[in-house]
Each structure stands twice: as structure tokens, then as C-alpha cells.
Amino acid sequence: MTASLTACMAPAKLNLFLHVVGRRPDGYHLLQSVFQLLDVGDTLDFAVRPDTRVQRLSSLAGVAAEDDLVVRAARLLQAATGVQSGADISVVKRLPMGGGLGGGSSDAATTLIALNHLWNTRLSRDQLMQLGGQLGADVPFFIFGQNAFVEGIGERMTPVVAPDAWFVVVEPGVAVPTPTIFRSPELTRDTKMVTISDFSRAPASFGKNDLQAVVTDMFPAVAMALDALGKFGEARMTGSGSCVFCAFTCEGDADQAIAALGGAWRAWKAKGMDRHPMSQLIES
């Protein structure tokens, strides 16, 4: 019987705040943020092949299989371990691309976790995180597997207790190119550094997203989404956009906000999670 894993979750994340605190000589930006896992995301199916081929069975508009982070993650794990197995991979894509929710990075992390288990390559969490970092700055967080206070260029993570909340997420319908935002001369890069205890004193409303002002100037749809969602609480953008979110203490309030938004926006709710649902597959 072919070894397989089905309906493997690749959860979304939110940046509860995102501060740009500096820039390295090599051009990489220094950040501080809290990453919050959500109970919604893409799902992936994996089946081991007896040969070394890696195939993406599902299509994804605008993304060739060879360029997909899922395929690249599988081949990176093959190269790192010398495993002589392959995989057929199917992806059910629910998270928008260019939305700041970490969809592609989460898919790649789930691929590394699942195939490390199915191929019995037995890499540790730290080893998988190091591999993931070669694919993108957010990939190691999803392998880390819990809400985190993130620093540096995204490589330093400390577990953090985030608010128990429901979130309404609005998709403005535009894809924001992250490099363009970070290159903007309008981006401030000198926000004062904070500590975990600073966040913990007021987690529901702490900080801001330093990228938000740049994005809203370039993409009016994001500004409009923030205005619409801001009628129900403090709305802010996640990551480099384009999605915006607002936190609610109870599910009913989140439902009411979605109903009030009507059909003008694609809006959905999600519950914050403490741990990645695939995390138990990593042995250490």
C-alpha cells in the first residue's frame, strides 16, 4: 500500500503587528512582529512514489509546477537527505496569493513536515527550519509551529501567548508585491524596538504595521477595506498586504461584522490557534 497523508493543513498566519526597526548593510530589513496562526488555510494531499519524481497534480493559475514552493520544498528535502522516493502532491488553494497570510510559505512548510514523515528522513525541527529558510523568510515560522514573537529578518522566534480571539479577514482583491513595498522610499525603518513584555501588556491593540501606509498609498482598495472593516474595531493590514483583519472576542461579533459588510467584500472569519496542526509529526 502506498504511504500517504491526506487533508494536511497549511494554516494562514496574521501579523498582529509589524515594525521595521532597521536595515542591514546587505539590504535586508530588520523586523519585529508577532505571528498568529489561524484555523483556516490550504490543504494538501501527499502520496509517496517509488521513483524520485515530484509531481504537483493540481493546477494553480499563474504558477508553473516547477516554480511552486511546494515542489521546490519537496526537491530541497530530497537533495538534503538523498532520499530515493518521490511524491504526488495535490493542493486545495484557499488563501489568496499576495495577501500577506503566508499561504505559499505555509504550503512549503507543510510539504517539508509531511514528506519528512512519509519519507522517514527524520530531520529535526531545527533542521527543517533551516531548510525552510532557503525557500522564504516565513517558512521557518510554520515549522516552528506555534505563535511567535519574531525578530531579525524573521529567523529569531520566541513562543508567545497571543490573545484568544476570532478574526475577520477581508480580501481587497489585489495582490501586493512585497519587494516593491520594502523598496519604497516612503517606508520608515526606524521604529523603536519593543519587547515581548511590551506586547503582552496589551496584546489586542499593540503596535502597528509599518508597511500599511505605503501599501494604502499604492493600492486604494486596501485603504477602502481598512475603512470598511474599521467600523467594527481596530482594523489593520497583515504582512505586506493586501488582506486586512480585525479581532473580536466572540464568534457572534465576528459573524455580525461579516453580515454587515454584505457582499461588497470577500470576508471570512477564523479562530486563532496556539499550535500548528501538523506539528506533532516532527519528532524533535
Image: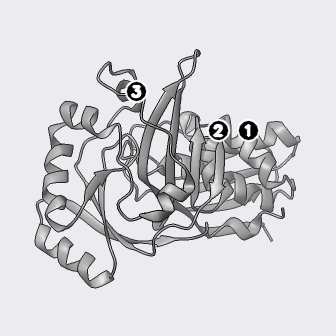
The residue where tag 3 is placed is: 182
When the figure is inspected, residue 84 is found, relative to residue 166, above or below; the finding is above
The residue where tag 2 is placed is: 72
Residue 157 visible, this orientation? yes
Looking at numbered disc 1 in the image, what kind of residue is underneath it? Leu
Question: In the image, what residue occupies the spot 13% across and 67% down?
Answer: 261
Residue 139 image position (x, y, % from top left): 61, 46
> Closer to us: mark 3 or mark 1?
3
Q: Quadrant of the rendered structure where residue 283 is?
A: bottom right
The residue where tag 1 is placed is: 76
Cα distance in 3D space between marks 3 and 1? 27 Å
Looking at numbered disc 2 in the image, what kind of residue is underneath it? Arg
Looking at numbered disc 3 in the image, what kind of residue is underneath it? Phe
Residue 91 visible, this orientation? no
When the figure is inspected, residue 197 is found, relative to residue 7, above or below; the finding is above
In depth, the one of 266 and 85 nearer the eye is 266
Question: In the image, what residue occupies the spot 45% across and 75% down?
Answer: 164
